[in-house]
Amino acid sequence: MRILRTIVLALGVAAAVLPFVWLLSTSLKGAEELFAYPPVLIPSVIVWENYSGLWNAVPMASYFMNSLIVTILSVTGTVLFCSLAGFALARYRFKYQQLFLVMIIAAMMVPKEVIILPLFTIILKLGLADSLAGVILPFIVDAMGIFMMRQAFLSIPAEIEEAGVMDGASPFILWWKVMMPMTRPMMATLAIFTFIASWGDFLWPLVVLKSPEHFTLQVGLSYLIGTFVDNFRYVAAGGIISIIPVVIVFVFMQKYFERGLFSGSGK
């Protein structure tokens, strides 16, 4: 049984890793090995010029910077606003509180694609179409993020809150200086989820952005496929470049991510 379990796990890991390995291999191949048969996994000669050629052929620096701006502002706004809403739902009692919670849970069940049209109509009326602000603002507060932070604040003992109130802490100070530091693992988990979702988002930026100078990396890569339709090495290099920031963030925040997944069980 243990051998069978090991084989199944190994096959699962291989299925998850193989596409990435093949993408990396393609980005480092020369033209003669690109369509070789049988396929070549390890290039005989590593062609780093694929990356420099891609970087010089299209405005990758602009795409990368736009994605970085969108992602950083999205992560910062989501963590702050979701923690504020989660704090209010977890630590205070007010009229229609349960109704708000039900509405938040219901919003988690709605696919993003369903609300694209009404959101785009709102963005047009606000004059934010074809701008990075139009990409960031509609999703800067996330229902899942509010629920996650609520659960994290619920896990904090009431005695800590009572001690802060007795010391004269205002609700804002109580949230910022007392409660927030105690929810760092969950904040890190939310930040990682938001980073991955924002950095890899394609549909919404594609709908909102029209000018090439405003393109995020994912939108730029979609046009890259049309530009270099016969040069899959450049396309693969662009894919690897888009993956690197996500890997770096996850590696440096992995310990907080793991702690956040097992914390905040709530009441």
Image (cartoon, grey):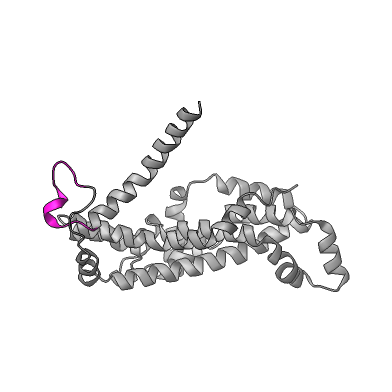
Residue occupying the point 41% across, 41% down: 13
Q: Is residue 82 left or right of residue 222?
A: right
Q: Is residue 41 magenta?
A: no
Query: Residue at the front extreme?
Result: 3
Query: Residue at the top extreme?
Result: 1
Between 33 and 105, which is closer to the camera in this rendering? 33
- Magenta stretch: give its range: 28-40
Between 133 and 24, which is closer to the camera in this rendering? 24
Quarter of the image where one finds residue 259: bottom right
x%, y% of residue 221? 29, 60
x%, y% of residue 31? 13, 56
Residue occupying the point 14% across, 55% down: 230
Q: Is residue 244 above or below residue 263?
A: below
Q: Is residue 156 left or right of residue 20?
A: right
Query: Residue at the left extreme?
Result: 32
Q: Is residue 240 above or below residue 19?
A: below
Residue occupying the point 23% across, 53% down: 26
x%, y% of residue 175? 73, 67
So how many labels did they put on this image?
A: 0
Residue 196 in view, yes or no: yes
Quarter of the image where one finds residue 63: bottom left
Between 239 and 222, which is closer to the camera in this rendering? 239
Q: Is residue 32 magenta?
A: yes
x%, y% of residue 177? 73, 71
Between 259 and 10, which is closer to the camera in this rendering? 10
Q: Is residue 115 left or right of residue 223?
A: right
Q: Is residue 37 left or right of residue 179?
A: left
Q: Is residue 56 above or below residue 15?
A: below
Give the dominant element type of the magenta stretch: helix, strand or loop.
loop
Residue occupying the point 39% across, 44% down: 16
Residue 127 in view, yes or no: no
